[in-house]
Amino acid sequence: MGRHVEASGTALDPRRTAPIAGLTGGISWVFAFFLPDGGALETTVLWAGAILLTVALFGLGLLLVRSDVLALRVFVALALPTLVWGVFGVVHGSLSDPELVDAVFGAVVGLVSGVRLGHHGRGVPRATL
């Protein structure tokens, strides 16, 4: 039998790292909504939040594939953030208040990550082939 990621206990466990990054990135984007427009602090907070949200999406992509095939896991882990950021870019550009879009996106990702973090470890592990 192969080694399953779900059973790993490393410090960089994607089941733990992804929700923490998503929660922190989401909070930072909501926080940036209340900062003055165009300031250096707002830009820094938005970029830091975007990096954390990308890490969260990458970790979620790793967890979507329950297989020992590393190439497939990495492909999905790279495709998920690309898809999400692409859709976000279209929505962000088409609405009249992009700062509100940032805050809502950050809040949604933060809430989902917080719920995922709260449910960590609960449930029955699934068998994989």
Image (spheres, rainbow, N blue to C red):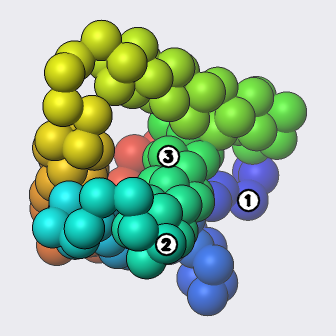
How far across and down, in percent of the image, does residue 9 sit?
Answer: 58, 82
- Camera-nearest label, 3 or 2: 2
Q: Secondary structure at mark 3?
A: helix
- Going from N to C along the chain, the mark reached first, 3 or 2, is 2
Q: Quadrant of residue 14?
A: bottom right
Q: Gap between marks 3 and 2, in whole Å?
A: 26 Å
Residue topped by disc 1: 3
Q: Residue at x 43, y 76 (%)?
A: 41
Q: Residue at x 65, y 38 (%)?
A: 77
Residue contact between numbered discs 3 and 1, judged by CB atoms under 8 Å: no
Q: What is the tally of numbered marks visible in this picture?
A: 3
Q: Secondary structure at mark 1?
A: loop
Give left or right: position of 78 versus 21. Answer: right
The three-letter code of the residue at mark 1 reads Arg
Q: Residues within 10 Å of mark 1 (few under 14, many from 20)?
A: few
Q: Residue at x 69, y 34 (%)?
A: 78
Which corner quadrant holds the C terminus?
top right
Answer yes or no: is residue 18 visible. no
- Going from N to C along the chain, the mark reached first, 1 or 2, is 1
Q: Residues within 10 Å of mark 3 (few under 14, many from 20)?
A: many
Residue topped by disc 2: 40
Q: Is residue 25 above or below residue 79?
A: below
Q: Residues within 10 Å of mark 2 (few under 14, many from 20)?
A: few
Q: Gap between marks 1 and 2, in whole Å?
A: 45 Å
Q: Residue at x 85, y 33 (%)?
A: 71
Q: Is residue 25 above or below residue 74?
A: below
Q: Quadrant of residue 73?
A: top right
Residue placed most toward the observer, 8 or 50? 50
Residue topped by disc 3: 57
How far across and down, in percent of the image, does residue 29 sit?
Answer: 30, 60
Give left or right: position of 117 versus 127. Answer: left
User: Residue 18 got which mark?
Assistant: none
